[in-house]
Amino acid sequence: MYKRWYIGFNDYWYTASIYLEEVSIGFAFLESLSFWICHFIPPIKLPKIKFKLKNKDDWDWTENKNGWTDLQEWYVDIGQLWHLFVCVPISHLRYKYTKTKIIDLPFNFALEKFPDEYVDYYDDFTDDLIERKKNKKIADEFDERFKEIYDKLNCMNYKY
């Protein structure tokens, strides 16, 4: 069994989680190999062979919005085809057989314990700034209560 863990931060809802994934070594190796190959495929352009898209929801993405496109316009190059038809299905298969255990933590507590894992993706000019500030306030209140209980538990454990 191949195990890996990582920390996930959500700086919209101000939550954090520790994830432990367990998957067979075969699936982990297959996924790594497919991504490695994907990385080194040269960007060879596809020919401009015309075809019509079957899914009508995708027609809006075509030039005339009639569903007709060509391989180069739709898929660009060989690397994109490999990624779409090999890498992505292998990843889906891997995640289908992956067992994941999740430990949820308060945002600030996780940030203190794992500061190098956090990456801020939001800027302060987004439309949802007011909503994010409300979420942060709630998370800060929860974090204070959590830390109080956490400190009490630590003190109880160190008495002996």
Image: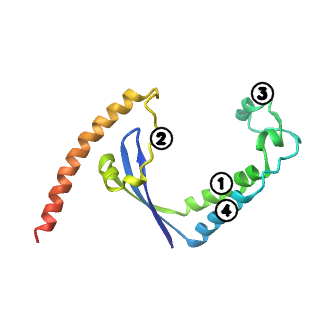
Q: Earlier in the sequence, mark 4 or mark 1?
A: 4
Q: Earlier in the sequence, mark 2 or mark 1?
A: 1
Q: Secondary structure at mark 4?
A: helix
Amino acid type indicated by mark 1: Val
Q: Residue furthest left?
A: 159
Amino acid type indicated by mark 4: Trp
Q: Is residue 105 visible?
A: no
Query: Mark 3 and mark 2: span between their CA atoms?
Result: 34 Å
Query: Mark 4 and mark 2: span between their CA atoms?
Result: 26 Å
Query: Mark 4 and mark 1: span between their CA atoms?
Result: 13 Å
Using a 10 Å C-alpha cutoff, classify the residue at mark 3 as few (fewer than 14 neighbours), some (14 to 19) or many (20 or more): few
Q: Which residue is mark 3?
A: 65
Query: Mark 3 and mark 1: span between their CA atoms?
Result: 27 Å
Residue 108 falls left or right of residue 77 = left
Query: Mark 2 and mark 1: span between their CA atoms?
Result: 24 Å
Q: Position of residue 49 (x, y in %)?
A: 89, 42
Q: Is residue 111 above or below residue 96?
A: above
Using a 10 Å C-alpha cutoff, classify the residue at mark 1 as few (fewer than 14 neighbours), some (14 to 19) or many (20 or more): some
Q: Which residue is mark 2?
A: 121
**Residue at the location (61% across, 56% down)?**
92
Question: Pointer 4 and pointer 1: residues touching (CB < 8 Å)?
Answer: no
Q: Which residue is mark 4?
A: 36
Q: Secondary structure at mark 2?
A: loop
Indicate which disc residue 88 carries. 1
Nearer to us: label 3 or label 2 = 2
Amino acid type indicated by mark 3: Lys
**Residue at the location (43% across, 31% down)?**
124
Using a 10 Å C-alpha cutoff, classify the residue at mark 2 as few (fewer than 14 neighbours), some (14 to 19) or many (20 or more): few
Query: Mark 3 and mark 4: span between their CA atoms?
Result: 36 Å
